[in-house]
Amino acid sequence: DVIDNDLTPVPKLLCRSVLLGGSDKWRGREYTRPLSYYESLPLADEIRKGNFSTLTLVVGGIRGWNVDANGQVQTGNGSAGWRRRHSAAPPQTHNPWRSCAYVASVAKYLQQRLNVEVAVRSSDPDSDFAFMSHAKVYVP
């Protein structure tokens, strides 16, 4: 919801960090990072070493919607177990196109820059945690 409710054009979101608002302990923390953040990562070195051939972006559930590496949106979220526990349909008033466009832009950028397959994972938190625990390389 943070960038979906932001009026900043998506290309500008890719040029700066978006910080969380509010008055709680999360205020001021980075919610999204600019493309320059990804430029500074040593991922190309890891790919050349043969440590991985697919890069997976774990984006979490985008409020009951899924996004693939092409930015295509699907209703529902994650595994069949998640859908059973959260059987209510995604809110029809919320359109995550800005979040999806941001994720698709980052995926496309990484795919072009690193010449590696990029997958986007949007699942329930437990499954995402289990998936990430098996990562060869983890980048926050």
Image: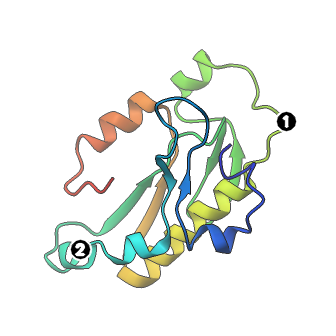
Judged from the image, the secondary structure of the residue bearing numbered disc 2 is: loop
Where residue 33 is drawn, which disc sits there? none
Sort mark 1 into few (<14), some (14-19) or many (20+) by Cα contacts within 10 Å.
few
Give the quadrant of residue 125.
Answer: top left
Q: Is residue 115 visible?
A: no
Residue 61 on image: x %, y %: 57, 39
Left or right: where 53 falls relative to 13: left
Sort mark 2 into few (<14), some (14-19) or many (20+) by Cα contacts within 10 Å.
few
- Residue drawn 60% across the image and 42% down it: 21
Judged from the image, the secondary structure of the residue bearing numbered disc 1 is: loop
Most extreme residue toward the left, as rendered?
49
Left or right: where 95 falls relative to 64: right
Residue 86 on image: x %, y %: 63, 19
Most extreme residue toward the top, as rendered?
85
Left or right: where 72 falls relative to 54: right
Q: Is residue 137 above or below residue 9?
A: above
Give the total of numbered labels: 2
Where residue 92 is drawn, which disc sits there? 1
Q: Is residue 11 visible?
A: yes
- Residue drawn 24% across the image and 50% down it: 135
- Residue drawn 56% across the image and 45% down it: 20
Between the C-alphas of marks 1 and 2, the distance is 40 Å
Q: The residue under label 2 is which amino acid type? A: Pro
Residue 10 on image: x %, y %: 69, 68
Residue 60 on image: x %, y %: 51, 42
Asked if the residue under mark 2 is in contact with the one under mark 1, i.e. CB atoms within 8 Å, the reply is no
Q: The residue under label 1 is which amino acid type? A: Gln
**Residue placed most toward the observer, 61 or 139:** 139
Q: What residue did someone put label 2 on? A: 42
Q: Is residue 31 above or below residue 12?
A: above
**Upstream in sequence: badge 1 or badge 2:** 2
